[in-house]
Each structure stands twice: as structure tokens, then as C-alpha cells.
Image (cartoon, rainbow, N blue to C red):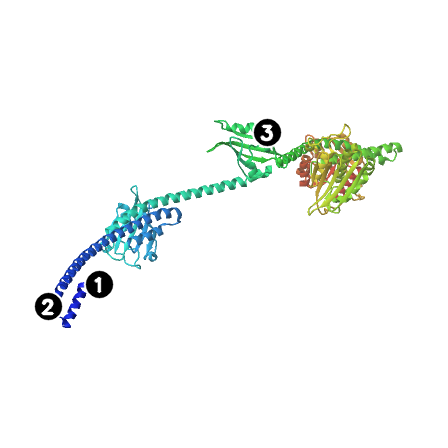
């Protein structure tokens, strides 16, 4: 048993040695010591043998551990390499610029101090630095590039082979990047190739010579293969990103274009279901985009009477081999039950999902309103052309009627009974003249004298005229005149005629139902004064409404109306720069709205005729040129205080003027052979001083050509039919200027 770390023979030996010192017999002690020594020798021998074995075991263990450490290092290096390759794939997908990160890992893995990746630009034939890493990263003074064959990188790209340089001092083709950084002694440059195409190079360097081993060579070759694939992937990825950006930009432009057009845009599939609509389409029909796309067909959007025709057209696009384009109109049914006239233009488009119908929808409501106004304007223009000729002839006939009736009244020898008849003739002629002026004025902006007009005053004057009729027909008048003092400028007589026409129509609409309410409202804004006249009659039927302003259109019984009242009123308001509109619904009466511009008074001097002076009363020579014999004769009668000569055409006037001089020449504008303007130019060509002696007469001062001519020559013109006083005053004024 061991004690204090000693074996049993050792203990026994120590005991016997103590006994010898204490006097125990030597023989006995020696006899006892020998076996102990033998046992001890045997223990030492065993222990020595065991120690040798342990030493051998330890040596073998150390050798085994050394080999394992090398293998472990190799495994760790392989794992790091695999991790780097995996990182390449991950970085290619997720990172914006992954090559700096990859290069940094390559430098760490290979024990290099610096590294760089350079890209071969095939368009320029150069090798450009893409990224750098390591301790030399921030020591570049300028961007690095080589031509093919220049420097180590240029040679590697050109030859497509790797270059391992133990000491760059022994390599004449080496070109240092920058003198400010650590010196490069070892350099390893490998091509990055894919299918024999060199995409670039990867470089690693060290400040010590021969720093890279064969193992580095093995690792870098593996890395270069995967890095080349990563470059190719990055290029493809960048192309894909550019393509996606182009698609996104194209889609943005497409959406902007589709949404910015003023028309509705749609795509229908072969089953008639909407696959795409823009916001304008939604505004036309009043449904949301989601509601339209959820519809199984367009049926809810089309007026039932048009559905069969519209669906038949859309079904044609589903036929195989069809190549159609359609343009048609129909009525859409909006969400609020409005009927919206639309024009559709569509054609076949073939998409991945199959044939589709692509088209645009245009809301025709405003267009039809403008078209209606244009047609009405064209009717008025045609009527105006017709009336110009008619009223010219009417004025020519009225001139002698009015003139002779006034001359008869000035005779003083006419019996009273006859005088009464003559005055009636004059009154009728004057009234007919006013009617003719209205007919001419409603199709054109008349040049009649204008004066300040207050709408409220006109309304009260018209109501005074129709008060007996209103009471007789049991019609109550409700007045709400706000802004009644607002002022416009126009012809009071014509505007009064407009209000009278509208009120008379309202009375006739309510009369059959035994009475009603006439509501007259007025108001004003910044630039418009308006008056509204509403009745409680049956309203205007839809089929009649588009025609109410047409000339000669009437629904009244024969001899109850001419169909000119509203058309004349429309023309008068237009000539005053205003608007005349109507609002109606069946069973809810009609409401006419007159709008006129608020204007200041025209600074227009009243026309006054000077009293003839004694010198002007002297007998003068006057030439009258008019193709109407009666007009020439009545003018001669009106100017009987002078020597008057009458001729009936321009040629005859030229013959007379070649031999005679006249103080005044009255020229009719319209005549055969040579008209008034032609005769005037002939007179001026012979003697320009004679121009001041000319007075024109015409039955249509509203004719545009007549207005332009009179404005250009600045001569006075008498409008037919004129009164005796108007003629004599005009002649007297011109004679006075000659004195």
C-alpha cells in the first residue's frame, strides 16, 4: 500500500535501513533488504517500460494531431470558400453593388493585402476598375484602366490566362497603380471567363514577394470561375432590372395616357365583360371602376332599346379570324337613370387571354347641344339671307306708302274722313316698318341705336300691357325682382318684344287649364343680369323641345301663331350679346331665362336735324337714282321745293351726270347694271369733290356688305321706309354744308 506517494518495497526498504541504524543485526537486515531491493528494481523496470510506451504514445498522438490540424485547416478553408461562393449568389440577388463585399472576403480568405476586380468593356477595348479592397483601397489617385495588352490586367484579358508573379520587380510589364500606397511585390491576376469570353479579371496582391502558395492558386481558380458566373449573372440581372424599369415606365405612360384622355377607354373580353376602364368611363356612367369590372356584361349600361344592336356588334369580336373596326352611337344608361348619348369607336385586339375589344367612348351630350345650336344658327343664317331680300322689297313698297300718306296729311285739303284713313295707312306702314326691322335684327347684331335699359322697368311695362289678359285668364303673377336696377345697353323696344313674346306663350300654355301662376324672377352677378319667366302649365314635350327656337315652328292652331315669336326673341337676345335658354319637364311647366351682359350706357349723341337755313331753302338741283319708279316719284314729291330729276338705273345716271351738275345726289344701294357703290366710285373717279354731295338710300342697312361699304366711305344713308321729315332734314343738312 502506497504512502506519501511511495511504493511498498520502498517503504519496507526505508524501515530496514532505520533498523540497521538502531542496532538490528546486519545479517538479518541484509536478508530482509535483498528481497525488497529486488522488488524495487522490478517496479522501476516496469515503470520505465511504461514511461517509454507513454512517450511513444504521446509522440504518435502529437503526429496525429498535427495531421488533423492541417486537414482541419484545409476543411475550414474549404468551408470558407463554399461560404464565399454562397455569398456571391446571395449578394447577386439582394445587394445593389455586391462586388466590394465579395472582394473583401476574397482578400481575407487568401491572406492578401489588397485586391481589385476589373471589367472588360468590349465596346471600348479597355479594362476598367470596378472595385478595390484591402489596405490600398483608399490610395487610388484616379480611376484605373488599361488597354488590351497593357499592364498585367490587359495581358490577362487579351490572353485569357492567369498570371502569378512572385516579385513584380522582375516583371517589366507591371505598371504600379499609385506610388502613395504600400509597395506591391506579389501579384496574382486571374481572368474571369464564361464560355471562352473574358468578362474581366480579379487581382490580389501583397507587399512581400512570393506571398502566394499553390493552395492560393487553387483557391483563386475556384473563386474566379464562380466570380465570372456572378459577373454574368449581375449583367443579366441588370438587364432584367432595366427591362423591368422599362416595363414599369411604359406601364406608367400607358396608365397616364389612358387616364388623361377626355374620352372613356375600355377593354372587353370575348364574353363581353369589362377587363379595363379608365376614370373618364366611370364618370360617364356614374359607376365605380370596381362595379363595372364586376358586371357580367354591359347590359346594365345600355338603354334596353339599344342592347340588341350593341351586343350584336360586340359579339362579332369573339368570332375566329375576325378583324373588325366599328364606329357607332347608342344611348348609355347612367347610374342615376340619365340617358347619355355616346359615340363608340372600337377594334379587335389579340391578347394572351384571347381576342378582346378595345375602344373609346365619347359623351356626345355637349356635342349634340352644340350641334343643335349650330343647326339653329344655320337656320337663322339661312332665314336671315331670305329675309334680307324680302325685307328689302318690303321696305321699297313701304316707302311710297309712308311717303304718300304723310304728303296727303300735309295737303290740308283732304276731308276729315279721308284724313282718318290716311293716318291709318301711315300707322300701318310705321308698324310694318317696325316688324321688318325686328325680322332683320333677330338674325344679326343690328346697328340700331342702343340706350341704357333696366330689366325691372321693362318687366313692369310689359305687365301693364298684358294685365287685362292675365286677369281674364285667372293667372296670378309672383314677382321677385332682385338686381332689377342692373343696367344693360340695348334696344328697349326689341327687349320689350322678347319679354312680351315669352309672357304671351306662358299665358297661352296656362289658359286651357283655367289659370295658373306666372313667376317672374330677376337677379344679377358680376357681369350678367338675368330674368326668369316660369309658368305652371303642362311643360314642353321632349319631342318638341329641340325645335322651339326654329323659325316658323309652332304648335298653335292655324292663325293663332306664325312660329316666329321665339325665334325672333332668340335672335334679338343673341344680337344683344346675351343668352336665351329654356328649362322644362312634363307636367312641371316651362321656365325661360334671359341673360344679358351688364353694361354701361353708350355715349351716343341723339340724332338731331337742324332747321333749314334760308340759304338751304333755296331751290337746288337734286338727282334721284332708284330702280323703283314709285320711290323716285314720291321722293320728287317730298322734295318739290327743289328741282328734282329722277332716273331709274346707274347707267342712266352716268349719262345724265356727264352733262349736268347737281347739288345733291340720292343713290339707291341696290340697282341693276350699275349699283349705288359702283356709281359712287365712278363719281369720285371723275371729281372727288362730288363725294360730299352723295346721300345713299337702302332697304337693308343690316346687310354686311352694305355696312362695310358705308363704314369705309363715311357717307350718310337713309333707311327705307323714311319719313318726309327725315328726307327733307337730311337733304337740308347736306345743302347747308355746301354753302
User: Residue 641: image x %, image y %?
Assistant: 81, 37
Question: Which mark is drawn over residue 158?
Answer: none
Callout in the foreground (1, 2):
2
**Farthest residue in the bottom direction?**
22
Query: Which mark sits nearer the N-terminus, 1 or 2?
Result: 1
Q: Which mark is residue 2?
A: 1
Mark 3 or mark 2, earlier in chain: 2
- Residue assigned mark 2: 27
Q: Are marks 3 and 2 in contact (CB under 8 Å)?
A: no
Measure the alpha-carbon separation of dots 3 and 2.
Answer: 144 Å
Front residue of this view, candidates 501 and 719? 501
Nearer to us: label 3 or label 2 = 2
The relative height of residue 681 versus residue 309 in the rendered view (above or below) is below
The answer to whether 676 appears left or right of 178 in the picture is right
Front position in the image: 337 or 373: 337
User: Which of 716 and 51 lies nearest the eye of the viewer?
Assistant: 51
Report if the CB atoms under discs 1 and 3 are less than 8 Å apart: no
The Cα–Cα distance between marks 1 and 3, rounded to whole angstroms, is: 118 Å
x, y percent for residue 624: 75, 34
Question: Residue 31 occupies which quadrant of the picture?
Answer: bottom left
Of 24 and 693, nearer the camera is 24
Position of residue 668 in the picture relative to residue 151 (left or right): right
Provide the residue designation for mark 3: 307
Amino acid at each position: 500500500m502506497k504512502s506519501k506517494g511511495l511504493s511498498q518495497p520502498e517503504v519496507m526498504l526505508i524501515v530496514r535501513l532505520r533498523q540497521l541504524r538502531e542496532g538490528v543485526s546486519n545479517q538479518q537486515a541484509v536478508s530482509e533488504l535483498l528481497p525488497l531491493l529486488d522488488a524495487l528494481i522490478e517496479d522501476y523496470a516496469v515503470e520505465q517500460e511504461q514511461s517509454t510506451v507513454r512517450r511513444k504514445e504521446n509522440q504518435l498522438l502529437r503526429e496525429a494531431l498535427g495531421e488533423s490540424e492541417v486537414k482541419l485547416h484545409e476543411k475550414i478553408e474549404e468551408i470558407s470558400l463554399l461560404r464565399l461562393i454562397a455569398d456571391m449568389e446571395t449578394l447577386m440577388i439582394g445587394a445593389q453593388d455586391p462586388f466590394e463585399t465579395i472582394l473583401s472576403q476574397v482578400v481575407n480568405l487568401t491572406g492578401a493585402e489588397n485586391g481589385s476586380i476589373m471589367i472588360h468593356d468590349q465596346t471600348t477595348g479597355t479594362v476598367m476598375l470596378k472595385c478595390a479592397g484591402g489596405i490600398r483601397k483608399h490610395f487610388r489617385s484616379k480611376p484605373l484602366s488599361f488597354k488590351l495588352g497593357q499592364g498585367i490586367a490587359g495581358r490577362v484579358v487579351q490572353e485569357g490566362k492567369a498570371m502569378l508573379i512572385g516579385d513584380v520587380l522582375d516583371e517589366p510589364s507591371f505598371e504600379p497603380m499609385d506610388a502613395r500606397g504600400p509597395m506591391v511585390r506579389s501579384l496574382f491576376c486571374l481572368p474571369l471567363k464564361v464560355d471562352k469570353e473574358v468578362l474581366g479579371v480579379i487581382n490580389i496582391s501583397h507587399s512581400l514577394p512570393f506571398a502566394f502558395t499553390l493552395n492560393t492558386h487553387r483557391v483563386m481558380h475556384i473563386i474566379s470561375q464562380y466570380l465570372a458566373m456572378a459577373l454574368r449573372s449581375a449583367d443579366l440581372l441588370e438587364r432584367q432590372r432595366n427591362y423591368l424599369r422599362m416595363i414599369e415606365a411604359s406601364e406608367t405612360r400607358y396608365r397616364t395616357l389612358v387616364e388623361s384622355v377626355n374620352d372613356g377607354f375600355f377593354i372587353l373580353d370575348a364574353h363581353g365583360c369589362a377587363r379595363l376602364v379608365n376614370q373618364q368611363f366611370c364618370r360617364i356612367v356614374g359607376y365605380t371602376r370596381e362595379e363595372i369590372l364586376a358586371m357580367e356584361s354591359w347590359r346594365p349600361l345600355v338603354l334596353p332599346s339599344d342592347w340588341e344592336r350593341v351586343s350584336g356588334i360586340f359579339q362579332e369580336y369573339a368570332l375566329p379570324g375576325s378583324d373588325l373596326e366599328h364606329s357607332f352611337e347608342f344611348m348609355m344608361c347612367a347610374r342615376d337613370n340619365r340617358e347619355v348619348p355616346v359615340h363608340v369607336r372600337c377594334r379587335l385586339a389579340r391578347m394572351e387571354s384571347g381576342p378582346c375589344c378595345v375602344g373609346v367612348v365619347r359623351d356626345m351630350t355637349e356635342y349634340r347641344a352644340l350641334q343643335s345650336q349650330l343647326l339653329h344658327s344655320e337656320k337663322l343664317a339661312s332665314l336671315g339671307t331670305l329675309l334680307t331680300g324680302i325685307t328689302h322689297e318690303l321696305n321699297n313698297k313701304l316707302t311710297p306708302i309712308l311717303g304718300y300718306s304723310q304728303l296727303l296729311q300735309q295737303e290740308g285739303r283732304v276731308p276729315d274722313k279721308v284724313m282718318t284713313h290716311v293716318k291709318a295707312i301711315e300707322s300701318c306702314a310705321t308698324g310694318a316698318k317696325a316688324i321688318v326691322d325686328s325680322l332683320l335684327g333677330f338674325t344679326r347684331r343690328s346697328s340700331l341705336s342702343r340706350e341704357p335699359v333696366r330689366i325691372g322697368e321693362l318687366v313692369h311695362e310689359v305687365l301693364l300691357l298684358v294685365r287685362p289678359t292675365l286677369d281674364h285668364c285667372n293667372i296670378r303673377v309672383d314677382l321677385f325682382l332682385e338686381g332689377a336696377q342692373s343696367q344693360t345697353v340695348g334696344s328697349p323696344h326689341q327687349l320689350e318684344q322678347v319679354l312680351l313674346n315669352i309672357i304671351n306663350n306662358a299665358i297661352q300654355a296656362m289658359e286651357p287649364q283655367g289659370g295658373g301662376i306666372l313667376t317672374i324672377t330677376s337677379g344679377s352677378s358680376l357681369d350678367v343680369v338675368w330674368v326668369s319667366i316660369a309658368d305652371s302649365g303642362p311643360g314642353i314635350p321632349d319631342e318638341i323641345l329641340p325645335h322651339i327656337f326654329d323659325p316658323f315652328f309652332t304648335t298653335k292652331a292655324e292663325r293663332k301663331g306664325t312660329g316666329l315669336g321665339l325665334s325672333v326673341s332668340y335672335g334679338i337676345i343673341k344680337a344683344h350679346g346675351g343668352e336665351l335658354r329654356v328649362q322644362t319637364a312634363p307636367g312641371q311647366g316651362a321656365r325661360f331665362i334671359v341673360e344679358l351682359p351688364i353694361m354701361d350706357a353708350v355715349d351716343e349723341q341723339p340724332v338731331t336735324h337742324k332747321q333749314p337755313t334760308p340759304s338751304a331753302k333755296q331751290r337746288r338741283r337734286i338727282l334721284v337714282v332708284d330702280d323703283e319708279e314709285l320711290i323716285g316719284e314720291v321722293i320728287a314729291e317730298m322734295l318739290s321745293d327743289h328741282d328734282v330729276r329722277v332716273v331709274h338705273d346707274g347707267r342712266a345716271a352716268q349719262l345724265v351726270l356727264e352733262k349736268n351738275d347737281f347739288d345733291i345726289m340720292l343713290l339707291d344701294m341696290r340697282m341693276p347694271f350699275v349699283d349705288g357703290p359702283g356709281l359712287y366710285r365712278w363719281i369720285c373717279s371723275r371729281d372727288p369733290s362730288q363725294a360730299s354731295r352723295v346721300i345713299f338710300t337702302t332697304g337693308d342697312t343690316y346687310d354686311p356688305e352694305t355696312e362695310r361699304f358705308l363704314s369705309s366711305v363715311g357717307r350718310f344713308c337713309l333707311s327705307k321706309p323714311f319719313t318726309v321729315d327725315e328726307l327733307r332734314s337730311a337733304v337740308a343738312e347736306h345743302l347747308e354744308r355746301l354753302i
